């Protein structure tokens, strides 16, 4: 990747941004350097997490919100996390079709990310993508996830506004409560208002919210009713998102959210740097595989195995070694 790409991104260059995002997904050393340059220019965009079961209507809602926010003069970014599950293959194709009409608009940037690698990789790639969109000057960034794994829950947790989309009659509510995602919703959306049971679900949610202890000065989650295929109730949803944004600004909670995001990002960076180092420099000759064998045979336990890796790590780590980019005296494929 060429240098100076960061400058192009800051100028709003869409192709440069796409290239940088791809580079960051591949953990390209130069892409990470470019992100370092961009970092001081980020932190301005408002992040909205949209989560819910596959088929709940997240993409349809986001499609509506794109239009609404554009009409309100905001530049919009969308990060869609595509689960690799075959069940949602059709939905992924659908997402493209539903959102496609906006791709021509220069002020809307849509990027799909695939879930891959160990769980830490997902939130890292998502946050990197958000940073690039932020640096491009996007005002609002909508992040779609199915909220299935811990990494996805983390992403929604660190969004400025967390939206949980439910639909009537799917047993969604129970699944969501299991996933612990109910706890993090700032706004509940009951989508598919045209289907029987939508009003009832809305009332159920309101009761559930009112039963939770509510401290003064705390945001009380709201419930929006939408029919995304017809763009109904979505204008009110957009207004509610901006109301929450204003609330965060005046209550000081925005600072808290930004801190939580910075913390997640730091921990992700540390975790992936360490794992990179271990994979590249300690895992020579199936070292990890051997440990897994030992564990399976109960010849060791995970704690002692981890301790052995840490001991090796502390003996090997050279001063000046950059585990993030794997650059220094040690070439990446030294042991291959
Ligand atoms: N009846 C009805 N169908 C909807 C509504 N919103 C979305 N859908 C449909 O539900 C399906 C899944 O929508 P999609 O936005 O892809 O859901 P996602 O998987 O959560 O992103 C699609 O066939 C949509 O047309 C709605 O309000 N009412
Ligand atoms: Mg979708």
Image: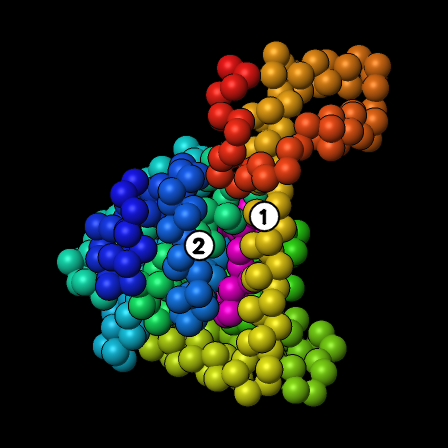
Across and down, in percent, residue 282 comes to: 64, 23
Label 2: element kind: helix
Label 1: element kind: helix
Measure the C-alpha gap from mark 2 to mark 1. 15 Å
Q: Nearer the viewer, residue 6 or 228?
A: 6
Residue 264 visible in image: yes
Residue that label 1 marks: 268
Start-end of magenta stretch: 145-163
Left of 320 or right of it: where is 48?
Answer: left
Residue 61 visible in image: no
Across and down, in percent, residue 29 comes to: 42, 39
Residue that label 2 marks: 36
Q: Quadrant of residue 46?
A: bottom left
* Upstream in sequence: badge 2 or badge 1: 2
Q: Quadrant of residue 309?
A: top right
Q: Nearer the viewer, residue 227 or 91?
A: 91
Assess whether residue 134 is covered by the magenta stretch.
no
Tell me if mark 2 has few (under 14), some (14-19) or many (20+) residues whose alpha carbon lies within 10 angstroms of its own: few
Residue shown at 70% from the left, 80% from the top: 214
Location of the N terminus by quadrant is top left
Residue shown at 61% from the left, 12% from the top: 285
Residue shown at 35% from the left, 71% from the top: 139
Q: Nearer the viewer, residue 243 or 178?
A: 243
């Amino acid at each position: 990747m060429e240098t100076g790409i960061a400058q192009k991104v800051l100028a709003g260059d869409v192709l440069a941004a796409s290239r940088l995002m791809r580079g960051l997904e591949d953990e390209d050393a130069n892409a990470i350097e470019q992100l370092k340059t961009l970092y001081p220019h980020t932190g301005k965009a408002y992040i909205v997490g949209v989560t819910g079961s596959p088929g709940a209507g997240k993409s349809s809602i986001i499609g509506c919100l794109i239009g609404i926010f554009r009409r309100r003069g905001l530049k919009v970014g969308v990060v869609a996390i595509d689960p690799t599950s075959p069940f949602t293959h059709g939905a992924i194709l659908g997402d493209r079709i539903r959102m496609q009409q906006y791709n021509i608009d220069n002020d809307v940037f849509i990027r799909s990310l695939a879930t891959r690698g160990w769980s830490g990789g997902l939130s890292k790639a998502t946050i990197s993508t958000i940073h690039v969109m932020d640096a491009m000057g996007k005002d609002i960034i909508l992040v779609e996830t199915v909220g299935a794994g811990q990494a996805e829950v983390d992403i929604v947790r660190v969004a400025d506004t967390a939206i949980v989309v439910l639909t009537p009659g799917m047993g969604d509510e129970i699944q969501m409560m299991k996933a612990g995602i109910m706890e993090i919703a700032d706004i509940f959306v009951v989508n598919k208002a045209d289907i029987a049971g939508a009003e009832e679900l809305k009332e159920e949610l309101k009761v559930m919210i009112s039963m939770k202890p509510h401290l003064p000065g705390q945001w009380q989650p709201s419930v929006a009713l939408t029919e995304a295929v017809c763009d109904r109730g979505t204008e009110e949803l957009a207004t509610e998102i901006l109301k929450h944004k204003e609330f965060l600004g005046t209550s000081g909670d925005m600072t808290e959210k930004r801190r939580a995001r910075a913390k997640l990002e730091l921990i992700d960076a540390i975790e992936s740097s360490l794992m990179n180092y271990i994979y590249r420099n300690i895992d020579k000759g199936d070292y990890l595989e051997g440990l897994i064998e030992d564990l399976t045979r109960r010849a060791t336990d995970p704690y002692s195995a981890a301790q052995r890796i840490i001991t090796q790590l502390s003996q090997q780590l050279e001063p000046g070694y950059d585990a993030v980019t794997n650059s220094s005296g040690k070439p990446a494929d030294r042991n291959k």
